[in-house]
Image (cartoon, grey):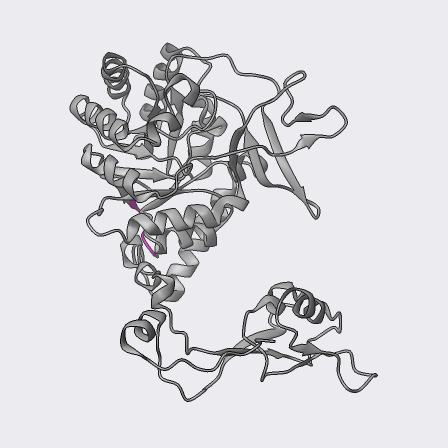
Amino acid sequence: MPDLTSNCAAIVSPNPFWLASAPPTNSGAQIMRAFDAGWGGAVWKTLGQPIQNVSSRFGAIRWKGASGVGFNNIELITDRPLETNFREIAEVKKRFPKNAVIVSLMVETREEWKEIIARSIDAGADGLELNFGCPHGMCERGMGSAVGQEPKVNERITSWAREFSTIPVLVKLTPNVGDIRPHGLAAKRGGAHGVSLINTIKSIIGVDLDRMVPMPRVGGASTNGGYCGAAVRPIALHMVAALAREPGFGIPISGIGGITNWRDAVEFMVLGAANVQVCTEVMLRGYRIVEDMIEGTSSWMRERGFQRLDDFIGSAVPAYTEWGDLDLNYETVAKIDASTCIGCQLCMVACHDGAHQCIHPSPDPAVRVPVVDEAECVGCNLCQIVCPVPGCIDLVPVENGFSPATWNDHVHGGAALRPKKGAH
């Protein structure tokens, strides 16, 4: 049986699946139910000076029958008294000593950081997460992403936390930047034991066209909120991988952003995350989704012969490179399996209107299976993406007689590139 024990920045938990700091971690009762369901850890909903939230506060994208593919919130940090939160943290740790409880924090002054860190440690926290990512409400007050977008401020406040803390410190980074690397490196310079990313993306989820008010509507107005859910996963994966491969970074990453199942979680880990945090999918489907994550990851590890998480964490990072280092002479063409094709011809429409015009009707009017002109096919895989039948279209490598060569090889060494196809 594979060992799912996770160690992220010296914070140990029974498995790598943590709840992210959000509504599902708003109270001790919720977190205890989550731990009963199987979650390995939880990051407490951010503590600071309690605020007043608005109503309503959530919005979602509904796409082809699926609700919540993209999710938006304008909720802020805890609106419950700090005394209540700290009492419940102690109660959770007493009942679940082996599960990780990380306390998310967001305050302003050095003295406030000192006090709230001491109170978190006294309550039994296993680690701290500094919320430098919130893109609405708090950033207007000089906190959240207002800190995360300024490396010098990030570094300074992180150094305060390290000075005051006797437990591991994670820094939660904002994705609302052009390049995540300077911000991760700033957290490291400040002494962070690790980083968490991504926080939510500044966004407007939609507009009520009857009232002409953005959503979610608060009376007759709204504001930008934080975008999350499955739709943000590609952005989160990129930022996690960018830090994981950055020379000299080398501190643990807790991956966050659009995780809905075990495969998503494993993708984060092979791209360098030591563990993962989940929020939106729990809000939509409940705590029990962790059962699939545990079972699916365990089964995948058994099939691959992995005994522990460290056997595969970061294993895909070496394959993430710059465009100029990709092999331009590697070539594929689309192959359609006539035995499984249902003749919908969606691939042909997509290829003609959105790609390279290389899929055509069969010359036999009685046959609905399209034909691929391999001499023109560039292997873009749009046809495979739109095909409704799994496995019907495959992208098959072809031998073209050219040795591997990258753009950098071509520019700097004169390496020969194969002739272009599909250039009408």
Residue at the extreme right: 366
Left or right, residue 126 beside residue 52: left
The image quarter containing residue 113 is top left
Which SS type dominates the magenta stretch? loop
Seen at 80% across and 87% down, the residue is: 364
- Please provide percent x and percent y for residue 250: 22, 47
Number of numbered tags placed on the structure image: 0
Left or right, residue 47 beside residue 334: left
In the image, residue 125 above or below residue 98: above
Q: Residue 172 magenta-drawn?
A: no
User: Can residue 378 be seen in this snapshot?
Assistant: yes
Seen at 70% across and 48% down, the residue is: 64
Left or right, residue 273 beside residue 199: left
In the image, residue 419 above or below residue 169: below
Q: Quadrant of the N terminus?
A: bottom left
Which range of residues does the magenta coloring cover? 2-6
The image quarter containing residue 150 is top left
In the image, residue 69 above or below residue 53: below
Q: Quadrant of the C terminus?
A: bottom right
- Please provide percent x and percent y for residue 169: 25, 31
The image quarter containing residue 378 is bottom right
- Please provide percent x and percent y for residue 209: 74, 30
- Name the foreground residue: 21 vs 226: 226
Seen at 30% across and 38% down, the residue is: 183
- Name the foreground residue: 310 vs 110: 110
